[in-house]
Image (cartoon, rainbow, N blue to C red):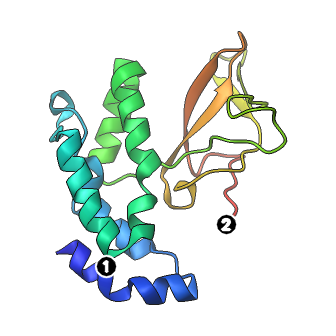
Amino acid sequence: ELASRFAKGAAERDATRTLPRAELDELSSAGLLAITVPRAYGGAEVSAATLAEVFRLLAAADPNIAQIPQSHFVYINILKRQGTDTLRKLLFAELLQGKRLGNAQSETGTKHVQDYRTRLSAHPDGGFVLDGIKQYSTGALFAHWIPVLAKDDSDHIVVAYVPADAPGVTVID
């Protein structure tokens, strides 16, 4: 049903560079952006084959809409495999309420794709400070949470899940 509706305006949105905010909100409201959340956290935990079929249908209707949440699902998988239980509980609950993940990965002027200047440093108050500028950030414009790749104080690559409206965060279209 959503794919059919999205197909009707796809060419015009593309030609006029109209961003599909309403359509992404519909995907979130329908629960389609939370279909891989594990059952243990209240999700449907659909298979990769089911996820691929959902996005095949969406891509046939409007490839722009299907491409935007690619990173969303990548970072759900990272949460499943590497997130702490506390982080999983928080973010999976957010996703089940329709929140979206974007990304902030690559940087310009670096030697290779994992050469990050962005730093996540421990703060004396027990929190963290994230400092950097990202170039490639598909979905960040529509995200509620932005997973940011950075290097920590030990120079390990880490993912910081940052609220899109956090102080100091700017997403430029």
Q: From the viewer's perspective, is residue 25 above or below residue 143?
A: below
Q: Nearer the viewer, mark 2 or mark 1?
A: 1
Q: Do the CB atoms of the residues marked 2 and 1 lie less than 8 Å apart?
A: no
- Percent of width and height locating residue 99: 38, 52
Task: Determine if residue 26 is in view.
Answer: no
In the rendered structure, the answer to whether residue 170 lies left or right of residue 95 reads right
The number of discs equals 2
The residue under the point 63% across, 40% down is: 105
In the rendered structure, the answer to whether residue 160 lies left or right of residue 130 reads left
Packing grade of label 2 (10 A; few <14, some 14-19, many >=20) is: few
Residue assigned mark 1: 6
Residue assigned mark 2: 173
Q: Give whichever of discs 2 and 1 has the lower sequence position.
A: 1
The residue under the point 57% across, 31% down is: 160
- Percent of width and height locating residue 65: 40, 67
Q: Residue 78 appears in which quarter of the rendering? A: top left
Q: From the viewer's perspective, is residue 14 above or below residue 165?
A: below
In the rendered structure, the answer to whether residue 70 lies left or right of residue 122 reads left
Q: CA distance from mark 2 to mark 1?
A: 22 Å
Q: From the viewer's perspective, is residue 137 above or below residue 38?
A: below
Three-letter code for the amino acid on which mark 2 is drawn? Asp
